[in-house]
Image (tube, grey):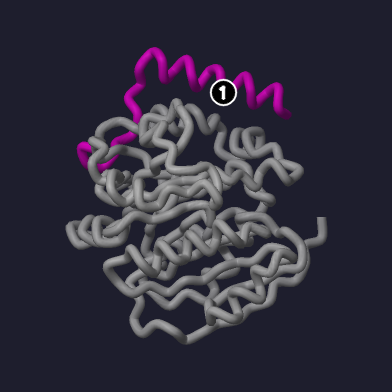
Amino acid sequence: MILDKIHFSKINEVNKPVFSILIPSWNNLPILKICIESIRKNSSFNHQIIVHANEATDGTLEWLKANKISHTHSEKNVGVCYGFNAPYSLADAEYICLIDDDMYVCPGWDKALWKEIQKLEDDYFCICGTLIQPYVTSYKCVIGPYNYGRNHAEFKENELLETYDKIHFHDWNGCNWYPMVIHRKIWNLIGGLSVEYTPGMYSDPDFMMKLWHLGVRYFKGVSGSRAYHFLSLSTSRIKKNDGSKQFLLKWGISSSTFFRYYLRIGTTFKGKLKEPGMTIKYRLALIKDQLKKIIAH
């Protein structure tokens, strides 16, 4: 597939932003408006917002220009890998924050993440907020089901603001979901998102694996930083890449093995992660993955 050229438009609107926030969007203007409004209204600090507009046939590009928001643009959908990497090229802050366009960040979301960053001894970390979702979920790191609306028309903002911080939860291991923050030096070392996963299936676990190989062991989901996730899935509109197979062939293990035995996603956070112990279950998982890899070839 030959990708469309990407165009760049930078607005010098924030002096010394704390985060440069990257948001890919694909003809999702009503939800994007809610996302950006929540960042502007509910943040404790000033941030640089940069959107990648895929296609933008719904008025997204005109809205971004009218509201003086830095953006990149492609006339065709280039997926989330380029959708994050392109706006990164306009980023000014030391800390890079990835957010999906169908998220509403709750008050103090950034302050809770910033407090975590201030505790750390170096830049080898990956921290993220905790999602609230309207559906039942099997993920132990997601708060749900709490239905505050499944689209922009149904959104119960006042109800969310009254209750989001009253839901008991814990800090957890693993990251892999947004809003996510890493230092720009770490982003540069791993090269952002891997574009061979375009349009983007399994680019997130690949991103985590690249961090792991770099030596990052501080993967923390912060309970005090919360965002509501509408789950307005753009993936239903695309022809998906076989990301599961790509991940397996690239790294030699499945993403499920990586999540369970390396990142320990959703388990209670107790500090830096360690290499997985050679338990019987882990050994069996590795054998199973090797068989999958042989079949995949």
Q: Nearer the viewer, residue 156 or 212?
A: 156
Q: Is residue 276 magenta?
A: yes
Q: Give the SS element for disc 1.
A: helix
Question: Looking at the image, which is closer to me, 265 or 255?
Answer: 265
The percent position of residue 134, horizontal first and vertical second, equals: 46, 36
Which residue is pictured at 47% across the width and 86% down the height? 12
- Indicate the amino acid at tag 1: Asp
The residue positioned 32% from the left and 44% from the top of the image is 221
Q: Is residue 209 visible?
A: no
Quadrant where the N terminus sits is: bottom right
Q: Is 268 above or below relative to 102? A: above
User: Would you say residue 12 sits in the magenta stretch?
Assistant: no
Residue at the image position 36 percent from the left and 67 percent from the top: 41
Answer with left or right where residue 14 lies relative to residue 64.
left
- Which of these two is toward me, 280 or 173? 173
* Side of 268 relative to 260 (left or right): left
What quarter of the picture does the C terminus occupy? top right
Q: Position of residue 17 (x, y in %)?
A: 35, 76
> Residue 246 appears in which quarter of the rendering?
top right
Q: Which residues are magenta?
A: 269-297
Query: Residue 115: percent from the left, percent from the top?
Result: 21, 59
Up the image or down, 5 lies above or below 83; here it is: below
Name the residue that disc number 1 marks: 289
